[in-house]
Amino acid sequence: MRLNFDKEILEDLDKSIKYEWLEYNRKGAYSASTIIGMNTRREHGLLNIPHQNEDQIAVILSKLEESVFVDNRLYEISTNQYSTNIFPEGYRFLEKFSLDPFPSFYFSIEDRRIQKTLFLHEARNLLVIRYTLKNQGRPVKLVIKPFLAGRNNHELAAEIQGLNTDSYLGQNFVRWAPRPDIPELNVHYNRGEFIPATLWYHNFFYRNDDKSDSNRTEDLLNPGFFQAELQPYQNLDLFITTEDISDLSLEYEQIYREQTSLRVSSTANAPLDVLQNGFTIASASSKKTIPMSFIKTDKSVRNLLFCMPALLTVKNDNEQFLSLFKNLINGLEQGLLPVEFPYSQNGKVYRQADTPLWLINHAYFYFLQTQDVSIFSDEMIQKFKGIIEAFTKGTSANIYTDKTGLVFSGDKATNSGWFPLKDKTGGVVRYGYLLEVNALWYNALKIMEEIFMLLKKKRQATKYGRMAEKVQLAFKKILYDEKTMQVYDYVGTQHHASEFRLNQIIPLTLPFSVLESTLAKRVLMKIDEELVTPYGLRVLSKKQNRFTTVEPGTLSRKNAAFYKQAIWPWTISLYVQAAINYKHDSAHLNQDLIKYFQPVFELQDEGLLGFFPEAVLLNDFLHQFGIQDSVLTMANIAHAFTMLQEN
């Protein structure tokens, strides 16, 4: 992706901090900030690496603060926000920021032109930064102060006693090891010197942190400073790492050429190619799972399950799909999956009724894509039967099938469905016969019937087929209103919920829909009218959404607006699948959908550049929120457009 920002945007602080960049590699390390270099989130930092078995991200180096001396005149070219002011205001010296393919900052100080370029090594926890004096004339002196955070990226640092603030010096080398539980930091440099001088800087303020967090300020450790004189066209190169890189030749040009060729060869100009490449790197960055974000910790099993089809359609990676599938299914306990993955050794929570049913669906999806019958091994069949039996007999979170054959799930204290909505007293709203759960339940029973037919076990197939027939009849009787021709969101113990939500599309996406074709098409028409936007599906119908003013900075999964007012871009894949299933009469369906959803690609041109957010809010303006580098969104948009191209 190639982007340029000129001085008109850069010198406007309010505009410029809306644009952020992210460098990342296949090891899961990342570097991120705004286009003016002012950190506005606790997740921002120049070197952030997976830590503690990849369960967390450690912010090692928060930032560098640069000063330039021209004939002994001092210019501060960095920008920081503190709790009471912004200092220095180095953004005023920025002439240009570019992303081509790496972040580059172009400074103009008097008649001196300085370029700063940075990138991460694809296969090492190594950040490379080069400063270059770009024109003839007077030399300049650079002074660069590193600011160390030494924390996990969901925390904030504070000055504390007992940290190791020593600098360990070598030939053009310095090392810091402030905390034994955080990786040490090594810096190799090609010219100048490092002067130890320990100072704490207090009250860095992160304005774009979630406003529900009570504390958005932190203290950072500055262990000293680098200083070097640059003659015209000379460079100062910094190689910043948490690894032993003695096996690498620290020649900037060589490393730059190698890393540029990797980026150019793996990234095309087409938005879909960028998406596919980004998802490939994301899914390859961890052997255990698909990380839902580089900069946020998100272990949601449900979100992971929504990403898995893209492993087959986008990556064509059967091996990774099967490995992940087997790891997930081995976590089953009484027919349920833990809510988080990778699984921790303790503290597992089992309460979601839909996720084990998605597993059965994915097994069948894999079979349809590959015709590989090994997914239906005896071991896997026993796992699937265990899920069905657990639901039939009853399991945790008040999940059971009653005499109707439908699944009843949850209670006033337990949310077992998709949307964690609560009433004013904090009680769970959605429990009972949930639309999405029972659509998946019917689908799972039909898949079991198909599996046993395939295995030529007719008695077993008949058993599950009859169970499915009973569920379909009960679904139509209980969850469908003949008069209004409406499918209920859920049916509780005391009322029928008529809200028209995103989950209405679930039956339309499954290989076996609990809805008859005519009704399914009617539901899809209503989805077209009330939920679909060029940026994805609304969570709740625009006709039922009681719009209230929400400050964008407060929008997150913690906020009810996330489940009422938001649009989720990743749901484009659900809509595309439903349209493929039920809009056979549209002669130009694929071209029409590709054109209609093109605006979603514009999301990567603002916010976190080159990435797609977890959610957007569309009122007077388009606001991005939630996880900024949402792999859930990236995978599903790529999956959707791959389906459209191949269908």
Image (cartoon, rainbow, N blue to C red):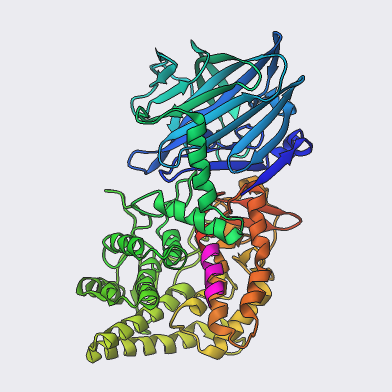
Asked if one can make out residue 503 in the rendered structure from this viewpoint, the answer is: no
Residue 593's quadrant in the figure? bottom right
Q: Main secondary structure of the magenta part?
A: helix
- Extreme residue toward the top, this view: 72
Name the residue located 39 percent from the left edge and 66 percent from the top edge: 355
Name the residue located 39 percent from the left edge and 85 percent from the top edge: 471
In the rendered image, the vertical position of residue 587 relative to residue 176, given as above or below: below
In the rendered image, the vertical position of residue 273 relative to residue 362, given as above or below: above
| The magenta stretch spans residue 607 | no
Drawn side of residue 448 relative to residue 536, left or right: left
Residue 416's quadrant in the figure? bottom left
Q: Where is residue 602 in the image (x, y as percent from the top left)?
A: 67, 56
Question: Which portion, as a residue range, is magenta?
Answer: 637-647
Q: Position of residue 276 (x, y in %)?
A: 51, 59
Q: Position of residue 415 (x, y in %)?
A: 44, 62
Q: Where is residue 1 in the image (x, y as percent from the top left)?
A: 61, 49
